[in-house]
Amino acid sequence: MKKPITTMFICICLCIMNLQLTGCSGHTEEEITEVVVSGETTTVPKIGLLLDSLVIERWERDRDIFISSATELGAQVEVQNANSDVAKQKELFRRMIEENLDCIVVVPVDSGSLQEEVKLAHEKNIPVIAYDRIIQNAGVDLYISFDNEKVGQYMAECLNDAFPSGANYLKVNGPVEDNNVSLVNKGFDETIHSNFTKIDETNCPGWADDKAFEYMNMHPEYMNQVNCIMCGNDSLASQVIRSLSERRKAGQILVTGQDADLTACQRIIDHTQLMTVYKPIDKLASLAAHSAYLLATDNEIEEAALFYDGRTQVKYQMVDPIKVTESNLQSVIIDSGFHTKDDIYRTY
């Protein structure tokens, strides 16, 4: 069992870290593993954060908030990036296990690929948290994410409101390996009105937005057949709208997204994107850091629902997303400080 972390120790640890760290994104390699308190050596919990990639805008926010929150609690964080490579993520996961970290937090590249690594971690009594995306059939210690079905529901609601008489639509989804894609689609399909007709859909491996652009350019005929396009995130939406713009269709065909990227907010006020979904990353990342700290110090996660991972029920902590349109962009995005008004309106 790991020794409980005393308040005095945390204060000392934070003072040392404040001297060494220049900011939450300046990930220094200094080792701060032990501090002597009242003649006893107390071990600093070490948490691994293993990301899918940092290509999409939001993930740098997740990383920085997680590190800042965990550091404030008195933990060390080791960050690794798999660059959307399943084999690389497996290798990095096993390396973290060999380092005997106290907890590993993973954003899986492929929701179905890390069962063996989770098993190996558990054999060494290392708890594993699936962050944002579930690791299927693995029995992780905790799954933390947004309500992804609600994301799809919000997209469909906006399209229902925009086209009360029905419409034709496309779906430009993320990768099939990401379980969140199926959850978003479930929420969308259960909400979209029956007078809507799906013309086609595609998946973009690795969330590669160039695939969305390529798909639209391969099917110019769809631009004369559809009224709206459901996009899996704002990055995909950006390339769909780019393709529409080249054919002077931007703003005529309504596009949805999620993540509340800065450029998506700009497109909303420019009327080329209908809506996005704001996911309070500060809440999610700080919750994950707090939960990782608890597990790393042999404490239990008490407040959690349950989520079926395909094999077993796992503990599940959920943060609600927020629908964003032009009407509430000020109150949700600007007033919260997620993006500034100057940044959103800088092109005007």
Image: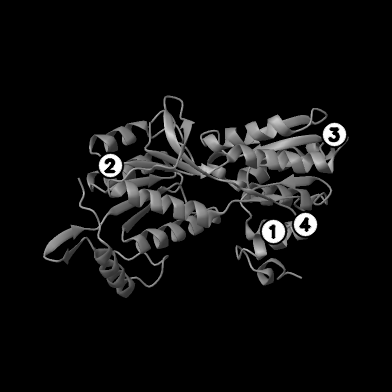
Question: Label 2 near label 3: C-beta < 8 Å?
Answer: no
Mark 2 vs mark 1, CA separation in Å: 40 Å
**In the rendered view of the protein, which quadrant contains the N terminus?**
top left
Task: Pick whichever, 81 or 99, lies toward us.
Answer: 99
Structural distance between the alpha carbons of marks 1 and 3: 26 Å
- Mark 3–mark 4 Cα distance, whole angstroms, equals 22 Å
Q: Secondary structure at mark 2?
A: loop
Residue located 56% across and 44% down the image: 207
Instruction: Describe the element under mark 1 as helix, strand or loop.
Output: helix
- Residue type at tag 3: Gly
Compared across the picture, whether 323 is left or right of 62 comes to right
Amino acid tagged 1: Cys
Q: Which residue is disc 1 drawn over?
A: 265
Residue 105, disc: none
Q: Which residue is mark 3?
A: 166
Q: Dot 4 corresponds to which residue?
A: 327
Q: Nearer the viewer, mark 3 or mark 2?
A: 2
Q: Does residue 180 appear left or right of residue 347 in this picture?
A: left
